[in-house]
Image (cartoon, grey):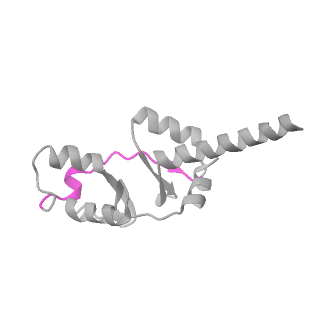
Amino acid sequence: MTVNQILNAKGKNVYSVLPSNTVYEALKVMGEKNIGAILVIENTELKGILSERDYARKIVLKDKSSKETSVHEIMESTVFTVTLADNLDACMELMSTKRIRHLPVLEDGIVVGIISISDVVKAIIEIQKDTIQHLNSYISQ
């Protein structure tokens, strides 16, 4: 299964904020959209990613104000990405080795989607269900 197949199943919605937005504004969007991370995009260029973990570690634990802190101050600017053609194994390997939970999907340098560890796990479970069903029908013949 490829990243493109995952996005076709889950949708290609991309939610983003500007680096100049406040962390509070970013959290508000994350809450409204029920997402655990938001991309930071400026002029179609991926600048970073902001996650709930970043908020907890860089705002809450450091006693900063989310209404006074800009996204660019705490976002992760080193963002690992995948393409539509990448497969699940490549995504799992990247997420596992880099200890990340979200992968923006780029096509010609433009963000066309994002997948999470949850999306990848769901896809793997579906593949395993199909394999089990195929084996059961083979055994029953």
Question: Which segment is the magenta one?
Answer: 68-84
- Which residue occupies 62% across, 49% down? 2
Residue at the far front: name it: 140
- Which residue occupies 35% across, 53% down? 36
User: Magenta stretch mostly in which secondary structure?
Assistant: loop
Magenta span has 91? Answer: no
Q: 86 above or below 40?
A: above
Residue 70: % across, % down:
18, 59
| In front of the other: 122 or 136 | 136
Q: How many marks?
A: 0
Residue 66: % across, % down:
16, 58
| In front of the other: 9 or 97 | 9
Residue at the far top: name it: 97
Left or right of residue 94, residue 70 in this image:
left
Residue 96: % across, % down:
45, 34
**Which image quarter holds the C terminus?**
top right
Left or right of residue 45, residue 59 in this image:
left
| In front of the other: 96 or 136 | 136
Q: 9 above or below 133?
A: below
- Which residue occupies 78% across, 41% down? 134
Left or right of residue 6, residue 23 in this image:
left
Left or right of residue 53, residue 90 in this image:
right
Residue at the far right: name it: 141
The quarter of the picture where residue 131 lies is top right
- Which residue occupies 63% across, 46% down? 126
| In front of the other: 128 or 23 | 128
Magenta span has 69? Answer: yes
Q: Is residue 87 visible?
A: no
Q: Is residue 27 visible?
A: yes
